[in-house]
Image (cartoon, grey):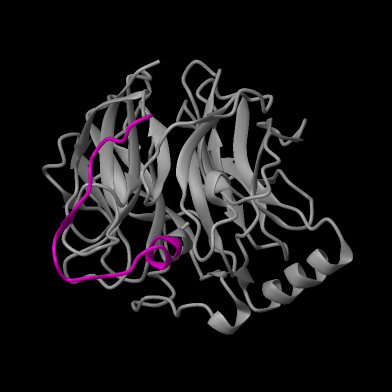
Amino acid sequence: MIFLTVLLLSCAVFAQEVTTEPLWYEGETHLKNVRQLTFGGENAEAYFNVEGTGLIFQSTRDDYQCDQIFTMDLNGENVKLVSTGKGATTCSFYIPGTDEVIWCSTHDHASECPKKPDRSLGYVWGLSEFDVYKSKADGSDLQRLTDTPGYDAEAAVSPDGKEIVWTSGRDGDLELYKMKIDGSNVQRLTWTVGYDGGPFFSPDGKHIIYRAFHPANPYELGQWNHLWEMQAVSPVTLDLWIMDIDGGNQRQITQLGSASFCPYVHPSGEWIIFTTNYADSNAQGMPNFDLFRVRPDGSDLERLTFSPTFDGFPMWSYDGKYLVWCGNRGERRARGETNVFLAEWVE
């Protein structure tokens, strides 16, 4: 998911002065006591630990030129580096019941940041040489879990802490795979040509929710194959899908004709929260992204955020009492910076 940071940068017009926008907007009836946890840099994909006392997230800050993995307390303090400080990182997650975390990185392939994708291809995400790693929450005891050539990223952990689901290009297409927490017993879960990615387990451990684009005609298939040869993906149209944890019963949830991603299931199992530009998909230039929620059967679509700038990467706490997400609202040292926000969830 590191390429989603490119999305955030594309949404922004940078300035040097500090800017301030509201922390809460009219219509955000499900959010209470919104707090800003980070101030400065590009911060994304912040996810709770089971205890609800801390977050793990990726950030480009200080002297780092691309994302590294950090942890912090729920008040935004005690920020600590987890990753190596080399290469680029993305997609970190706590392993429930342990003091370990997983994250994805390019550091074993190059110490430098990956090259940006060729913009002559249009707005695309580049697929860099990522692998999935496991370590202690302080970064010690680092173990590499994947070693196939190409892209292995977008990883998340099951609620029992026993399995990892992730996206890989190892078989010539972007598909979802599952493995044990030690990297063994790899199983392929999806087989449709196109992009299947950004997966998360449901809180009951029975389902996997993800985003997908499957070419629907010869033109789309030709475009997909061309970009794949260039190791790039166009994220213009993505919808939410859900399946059983063995890959069975795959079914589409949304058909919004927009870019929808980062789905996460509420602890009750009754709602899925996600990021989409659906409300602004016809806007000229880069459309705005907001948080929405929907039932697992695709009904009762509801908009949750109303900021004129980016809101994305949501996750409910394991008890459902809080929501964390990332956006461009609040205090920023430069216009367009992305920070982490926390709110009490009001049902």
Q: Residue at x 11, y 42 (%)?
A: 77
Is 249 on the left or on the right of 80, as rendered? right
- State the image coordinates of residue 29 (x, y, percent, origin top left): 36, 23
Q: Residue at x 38, y 66 (%)?
A: 9
Q: Residue at x 58, y 52 (%)?
A: 281
Report the front residue among 288 and 298.
288
Q: Main secondary structure of the magenta part?
A: loop
Report the front residue among 58 and 151.
58
Magenta stretch containing residue 79, yes or no?
Answer: no
Which of the image's four quarters has the C terminus? top left
Is 35 on the left or on the right of 8, as rendered? left
Does the rendering let one see residue 77? yes
Is 111 on the left or on the right of 225, as rendered? left
User: In terms of image quadrants, where is residue 187?
Assistant: top right
Residue lying furthest right = 218
User: In terms of image quadrants, where is residue 107?
Assistant: bottom left
Q: How many marks?
A: 0
- State the image coordinates of residue 169 (x, y, percent, origin top left): 65, 62
Q: Which residues are magenta?
A: 7-27
- State the image coordinates of residue 297 (x, y, percent, origin top left): 69, 24
Q: Is residue 8 above or below residue 289?
A: below
- State the image coordinates of residue 37 (x, y, percent, origin top left): 19, 42
Report the front residue among 295 and 214.
295
User: In terms of image quadrants, where is residue 185?
Assistant: top right
Magenta stretch containing residue 19, yes or no?
Answer: yes
Does the rendering let one see residue 181? no
Q: Is residue 217 above or below residue 273?
A: below
